[in-house]
Image (cartoon, grey):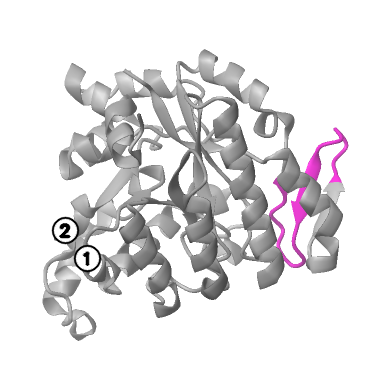
């Protein structure tokens, strides 16, 4: 069995170098921290993105994979992604990422699986880049934030991208970015501990209530952090569909869409993960670690092995079989 981590972050050297060269001219800042590591910052946003060697050097990542008992990383960006940038620079950043992902896959086809970054702030640029990047080797999914500069994911401007993802059979892997309520979560690391999980709930609910999943029945979506708040509030969402006029357009209960999503394993609590599995089914769960953040699993396989009542078949499904099927891995 091939163990596949679907939630592993990477900053390609070419991406970092592009930011260091051109970020300032496009409204952002690149600097070096006291350890000499690159850092990205946006004016007015306190969150700083540190680009440490363990998230740049593919050799170091491969060593960490061996230590974590992982065979393959699905490579993904984390903050700042590309949506902050003017459209043309956002496209350049996306192309740089996509080309680097394909090169990493060429370097080691078994270890590194690519995801496609798109300048979603300009969907007219995102669609042709999706066509181009989908033809690159090793690109098996589209990577997207759970909002685009404050626009929720059901916004109609994004639908051409969803249509193409469905046609190309490319799943969308979601990830939080500058979460809602961040102005009230400056202390205690709440922007991550709470904010990231709220973002997953908003994203999933907007895809349902905004008609995206009905319009694109073949679209596949992976929610990070085990779906965040979404699966836990499903009863409340169903009640809203029953009684609220704002949801009279809904053709079915929100709970009917639970299995339209896949969910990664990042809960940090085996019993909670067991409850998510009971709610959505083991075939909808994929391994995720959040490499290499301090909130990541250092031993993601061991976490899965601690989930109560997990059969050997369910364990294998979660560790790799589900991801292999979803991402069409060979």
Q: Residue at x 45, y 52 (%)?
A: 142
Q: Is residue 20 above or below residue 109?
A: below
Q: Quadrant of the C terminus?
A: top left
- Depth check, front residue: 44 or 115: 115
Specify few, some or many for label 1: CA neighbours under 10 Å numbering under 14, 14-19, or 20 or more.
Answer: some
Asked if residue 161 shows in the view, the reply is yes
Confirm whether the magenta stretch covers residue 194. no
Q: CA distance from mark 1 to mark 2?
A: 8 Å
Residue 293 image point, x, y percent = 59, 35
- For residue 32, what is the image quadrant? top right
Residue at x-position 16% and y-position 82%: 248
Quick check: 167 above or below 303? Answer: below
The mark lying in front, picked from 1 and 2, is 2
Read off the magenta span: 32-49
Q: Position of residue 192 (x, y in %)?
A: 54, 49
Q: Are marks 1 and 2 in contact (CB under 8 Å)?
A: yes
Give coordinates of residue 231: x percent, y percent.
26, 51
Q: Which mark is residue 237?
A: 1
Can residue 188 be seen in this snapshot? no
Q: Indicate which disc residue 255 carries.
A: 2
The residue located at (58%, 41%) in the rendering is: 101
Q: Is residue 189 left or right of residue 244?
A: right
Residue 41: say if magenta. Answer: yes
């Amino acid at each position: 069995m091939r163990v596949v981590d679907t939630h592993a972050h990477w900053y390609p050297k070419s991406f970092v170098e592009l930011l260091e060269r051109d970020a300032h001219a496009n409204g952002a800042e690149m600097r070096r921290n006291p350890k000499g590591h690159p850092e990205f910052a946006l004016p007015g946003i306190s969150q700083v993105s540190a680009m440490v060697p363990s998230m740049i050097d593919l050799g170091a990542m491969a060593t960490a994979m061996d230590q974590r008992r992982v065979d393959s990383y699905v490579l993904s960006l984390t903050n700042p992604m590309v949506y902050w940038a003017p459209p043309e620079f956002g496209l350049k950043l996306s192309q740089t990422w996509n080309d680097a992902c394909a090169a990493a896959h060429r370097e080691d086809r078994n270890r590194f699986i690519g995801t496609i970054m798109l300048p979603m702030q300009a969907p007219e640029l995102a669609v042709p880049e999706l066509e181009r990047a989908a033809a690159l080797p090793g690109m098996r999914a589209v990577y997207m934030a759970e909002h685009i500069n404050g626009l929720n994911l059901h916004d109609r401007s994004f639908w051409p991208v969803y249509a193409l993802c469905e046609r190309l059979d490319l799943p969308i892997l979601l990830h939080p970015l500058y979460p809602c309520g961040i102005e009230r979560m400056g202390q205690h690391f709440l922007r991550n501990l709470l904010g990231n999980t709220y973002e997953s709930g908003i994203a999933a609910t907007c895809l349902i209530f905004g008609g995206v999943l009905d319009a694109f029945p073949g679209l596949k979506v992976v929610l990070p952090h085990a779906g965040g708040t979404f699966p836990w509030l499903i009863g409340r969402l169903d009640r809203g569909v029953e009684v609220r006029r704002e949801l009279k357009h809904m053709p079915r209960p929100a709970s009917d869409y639970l299995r339209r999503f896949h969910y990664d394993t990042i809960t940090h609590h085996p019993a909670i993960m067991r409850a998510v599995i009971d709610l959505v089914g083991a075939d909808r769960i994929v391994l995720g670690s959040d490499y290499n953040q301090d909130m990541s699993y250092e031993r993601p396989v061991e976490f899965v092995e601690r989930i109560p009542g997990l059969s050997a078949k369910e364990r294998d499904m979660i560790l790799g079989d589900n991801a292999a099927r979803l991402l069409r891995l060979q």
